[in-house]
Image (spheres, helix red, strand yellow):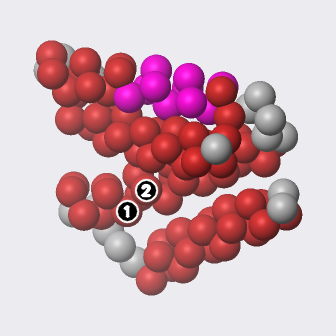
């Protein structure tokens, strides 16, 4: 269950990171509220998952999910450049996330 909570925490990290862009420096009310809510929820779920998961592994996976998801949504939503080297690098992060998870079984 804690792995699932960690995964959801990582997805919420993507939500709050993208929300930062939409909030425009916390000048837009609803995007700011959504950003703060998802930020708090992400940290809470990360904290709960750390009750039984190793901190280094869990944190690296949380950050990795957030980094990959935010980069992908940045390309999709904000027309950020999607070069081959960027896609390959994101793929390597995904391999690292999978490797960390498999190392814990």
Other-residue count near label 1 (Cα within 10 Å), few / some / many at <14 / 14–19 / ≥20:
some
Q: Is residue 81 above or below residue 9?
A: below
The residue positioned 54% from the left and 79% from the top of the image is 88
Contact check, label 1 and label 2, Cβ < 8 Å: yes
**Which residues lie in the magenta part?**
38-47
The disc at residue 72 is 1
> Can you identify the residue that label 2 sits on?
69
Query: From the viewer's perspective, is 50 left or right of 75?
Result: right
What secondary structure is the magenta-colored segment mainly?
Answer: helix
Residue furthest out toward the bottom: 84
Query: From the viewer's perspective, is 26 left or right of 65?
Result: left
Of 99 and 73, nearer the camera is 99
The disc at residue 19 is none
The residue positioned 56% from the left and 75% from the top of the image is 91
- Using the numbered discs, state the Cα–Cα distance from disc 1 to disc 2 in whole angstroms: 5 Å
Q: Position of residue 30 (x, y in %)?
A: 15, 21
Residue 25 lies in quadrant: top left
Q: Quadrant of the N terminus?
A: top right
The residue positioned 58% from the left and 48% from the top of the image is 4
Residue 15 visible: yes
88 within the magenta span: no
Q: Position of residue 48 (x, y in %)?
A: 65, 27
Residue 24 lies in quadrant: top left
Mark 1 residue element = helix
């Amino acid at each position: 269950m804690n792995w699932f909570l960690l995964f959801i925490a990582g997805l919420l990290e993507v939500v709050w990171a993208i929300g930062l862009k939409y909030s425009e420096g916390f000048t837009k009310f609803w995007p700011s509220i959504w950003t703060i809510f998802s930020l708090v929820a992400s940290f809470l779920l990360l904290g709960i998952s750390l009750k039984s998961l190793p901190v280094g592994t869990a944190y690296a996976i949380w950050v990795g999910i957030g980094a990959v998801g935010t980069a992908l949504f940045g390309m999709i939503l904000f027309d950020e450049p999607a070069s081959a080297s960027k896609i390959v690098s994101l793929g390597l992060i995904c391999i690292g996330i999978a490797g960390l998870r498999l190392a814990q079984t």
